[in-house]
Amino acid sequence: MMSKEKTIIKRILNDIRVDLSDEFDQNFEREAFFGEAWERHRSPLRPGGHILVDTGTLRRSVRSEMKETSIRFFTDLPYADIHNEGGEIVVTKRMKGYFWHKYMDAAGALTFARRKDGTQRKDKKTRHISDVAEFWKFMALKKEGTTIKIPKRQFLGLSPEVEKAVTDIIEDNLQEYLGKEMEHFEKRLKK
């Protein structure tokens, strides 16, 4: 491949990487895969919080890899696929142990939500901690082998918007390249 061709391909791929990295990140802000809104849920864990953004680890895990003539967007987190594609997960003994651990953490926080005389406070924060503890207890009491439905909340992949963005980037870069080539050609003709 000629040097000019490599340069234009590299520029196109880099522009695609920059634009789509931003778009995929914005999916977490939009709480949608471009125009397709993610299914809402009521979680006592994060009332009013963004969907799929608890610690931000999933959002920050989206990366790109450029090769000579291609680009790939991916995340290597083990739970990314189930959130991106949706599906069902089977409750295991290990998961139940995790749920009990989270319950104990949340229930332990309730011991600090008491007045000096030992009675439970009834403020908003205490109610929230109580709701969180109840959620984890509910999860921990699920029987092994039962399934939990995870709705599809796609944040990465192909879509008409992705294809349009790629097409626009290619066209813009080729027009710029061909415009410069025409200028060079016209200058040579004038000589």
Image (spheres, rainbow, N blue to C red):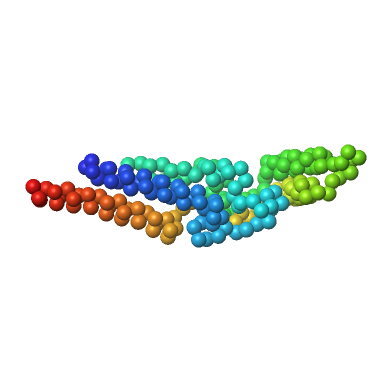
Of 105 and 50, which appears nearest the observer?
50
Residue 38 locus on image (x, y percent): 57, 58
Number of numbered discs overlaid on the protein picture? 0
The quadrant holding residue 115 is top right
Outermost residue toward the right in this view: 117
Residue 24 locus on image (x, y percent): 48, 50
- The residue positioned 61% from the left and 42% from the top of the image is 55
Q: Would residue 143 be seen by someone viewing this image from the given angle? A: no
- The residue positioned 32% from the left and 45% from the top of the image is 11
Quadrant of the image containing the N terminus? top left
187 horizontally vs 15: left or right: left
149 horizontally vs 161: left or right: right
Outermost residue toward the left in this view: 191
Residue 22 locus on image (x, y percent): 46, 48
Q: Would residue 115 be seen by someone viewing this image from the given angle? A: yes
- The residue positioned 44% from the left and 55% from the top of the image is 158
- The residue positioned 68% from the left and 56% from the top of the image is 42
Residue 172 locus on image (x, y percent): 31, 54
Of 183 and 68, which appears nearest the observer?
183
Of 89 and 20, which appears nearest the observer?
20
6 horizontally vs 92: left or right: left
